Amino acid sequence: MAETTYIDAIRRALGEEMERDANVFLMGQDIAAFGGAFRASKGLFEKYGRLRVINTPLMESGAIGAALGAALVGKRPVLEMQFADFVSCGFNQIVNNVAKTYYRWEAPVPMVIRLPFGGGAGAGPFHSQSPEAWFAHTPGLCVVAPSTPRDALGMLKAAVRDPNPVIYLEHRFLYRREKEDLGEGDLLTPLGRAHVVREGKQVTVLSWSWTLHESLAAAEELAKEGVSVEVVDLRTLSPLDEETIFTSVRKTGKVLIVHEATITAGFGAELAARVADQCFEHLDGPVRRVAYADRPSPYNKKLEQSLLPGRERITAALRKLARY
Amino acid sequence: MAATKRSKPPPPLTPAGTDPKVLRRAHFLMRLSRAWDSRFEAMARVGRIGRWYSAVGNECTTVGTALALGANDAISTVHRDLGAVLTTYLDATRLAPALFPAGDATEWDALRPPPQSLLDTLASQVFGRRGGFTRGVDRSFHYGLVKPDWGIRHVGMISHLGSMIPVASGLALANLQDGNDRAVLGFIGEGATSQGDFHEALNLAGVMKLPLILVVENNRYAFSTPLAEQYACEKLSDRAPGYGIAGETVDGLDFDAVHAAMTRAVARARSGEGATLLECMLPRMRGHAEGDGSYELIPPAEREEYLKQDPLARFEAALLARGQADAARIKEVTEVTKAIIEDAVERALLTEEPELAEATRPVFAPGEVATAFARQSTEVTGG
Ligand SMILES: Cc1ncc(C[n+]2csc(CCOP(=O)(O)OP(=O)(O)O)c2C)c(N)n1
Ligand SMILES: [Mg+2]
């Protein structure tokens, strides 16, 4: 069977959902005939035309606001930010308008904002960021970050169908590196459910997206050293699947949180606080984090690599934690 | 004097041409809006409500534009657009049957709900009560009402001025996608034209030929800031050609001119010719919010000039001069509208505060995400 890459899984999700529901439409920069900076929508413009695959001018705030207007009268917009970094230009629309609408007057806002994010490509300070914490901090937004093609497909489809705004973080480094055989059918992944990817007994790793894969590699390394590591793919950051997280931490008694975003006030801080609060009696060591240094992402690849929380740093942190 | 830019005496009223049914309804709605403001201004003066942003002076523009729309055209309003809200929501002929001859009711009126109940909800909304559109979680005009069965598509504001312009463009985009001929009317103050969202939304409207009419209520000040400190072009409608859309500046004291310009803009929207930027020049008849000291900042001579330019007084003078109403009719409309508002306010004041549980009501619409949110143990307080 042919293997599907992460980016192809996204394209398949968009195509299937557009086919299923005529209210679903795409909006973004260069997404029509060109198919998007990463070709996520390639072929869809030819099939669905200019009113369902809308090339916008170079704009973020105005596009997100327009998507909100359309959503309020029954459409289901899926927006692509060309790079996640540019979502800051639409921040006000997301956190003040989109996120607060349902609470304020109970109008559902079915909308997906796709954010191609993350580093590892030597793309510098403005094409490498991981902005999940900005949005997880805002009530009213669902924030997801799938790490596999299967979940990229299933969670995007679920996000399109949910009546709420979903911030969908897709890691550019995974686009063409992750592949799997997906098979046919209407494949959905539930939103708000974490996934225990690797079972273990001594340490729990909580992670998502690219660092999830690095964590799995580190867990493999630790296994060779006789340390059994459980790896949980959070998949959805907000709302958080506390049940799966707490069950794992209570079992292993130790937790390492790994994310690519900068460490201070990163989403890991929230996880650490919740674990400390709810799993205190079960903890046999400090709640630790491995994350990006509090710096913008440098352009030179060697400089960037020195800051990325890759498998070596995760492995070292796991070794230390296992000794408690 | 900086602030008097464009405050030359207005040109004479354009000749009457408007349908008597439209004039009757317009007069009633403008008076209703004015009565509401008078009541709330009075309450603000004695501290019975915290803040009131008066729409006195805006009525001709809000009512004159909104009256040119039909069922399921959409409106997007900000803080001085009570007149447009009333125009969109209310079947005036059922609210004050004695004032309207049979035949004044429109097809849209047949779709609209009983007007009294909507007026009561609106009054409760403004007081932050249980019976309001948001049941106490957001203030005055910060809500929407999208009820296609009633022919009403209204999206209210958030505080961030300018933010609703793209949303209005999105309402227009949905019309384009559905292939219908409906128009969208968005309102903003001239202050919001300095926001980036103004540019982004109008640029998109130009590129996509969106059926959008953006009305700028230019009352010559944004809070305390006069026009000369806000923009350097002569008229704000001068920006329209820069976006490839139609632009017009009209005298917001002149009902016929406003209504006619809006009718032209609606025709453009319906026929696929695209968007219009319609600037209405208004007298600054009140301060930013009642009692906030901003009115005192306007030079006294200029203030007096504005107060003389009351668009409602001019409208009534024109009705009299043209023989479209007599003094008794004007008095009757004034009294009836005052009584309607008085009643609605009294009833709203008797309603209950919201239940405390409203504060923690869901942030997500029912579905998988809402269920997951409800499962979080440390949600509300963290223990
Ligand atoms: C984005 C934003 N910045 C600042 C404010 C504070 N503010 C509230 S009303 C106002 C002036 C608005 O002026 P204008 O748009 O001309 O409307 P007007 O009140 O004159 O009708 C300001 C600055 C705001 N509400 N939103
Ligand atoms: Mg103003």
Image: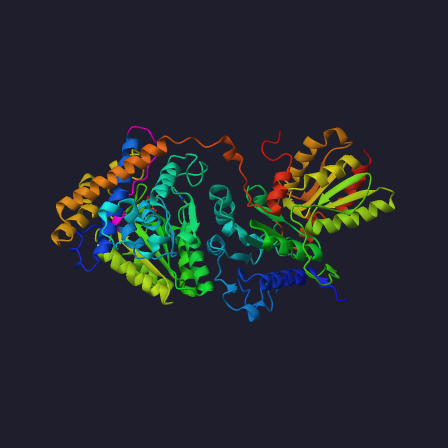
For residue B49: magenta? yes
Span colored in magenta: B46-60
Q: Quadrant of residue A170?
A: bottom right
Which residue, as the protein is rendered here, is positioned at the far bottom?
A46
Asked if A84 appears above or below B349 in the picture, the reply is below
Q: Is residue B179 left or right of residue A176?
A: left
Q: Is residue A20 left or right of residue B316?
A: right
Nearer-the-camera pick, A140 or B267: B267
Nearer-the-camera pick, B48 or B67: B67
Where is residue B126 drawn, in percent x and y? 37, 37
How many labels, in total?
Answer: 0
Q: How is the image coloured?
A: rainbow
Asked if A242 appears above or below B13 in the picture, the reply is above
Image quarter hosting the N terminus of chain A: bottom right
* Residue B5 shows in this picture: no
Q: Quadrant of residue B118?
A: top left
Residue at the image position 44 percent from the left and 39 percent from the top = B138
Where is residue B235 drawn, in percent x and y? 28, 56
Residue at the image position 74 percent from the left and 62 percent from the top = A183
Nearer-the-camera pick, A17 or A203: A17
* Residue A31 shows in this picture: yes
Where is residue B112 drawn, in percent x and y? 36, 50
Image quarter hosting the C terminus of chain A: top right
Where is residue A123 drawn, in percent x and y? 62, 56
Residue at the image position 65 percent from the left and 50 percent from the top = A145
Q: Overall secondary structure of the magenta stretch?
A: loop
For residue B375: magenta? no
Asked if B350 appears above or below B90 in the picture, the reply is above
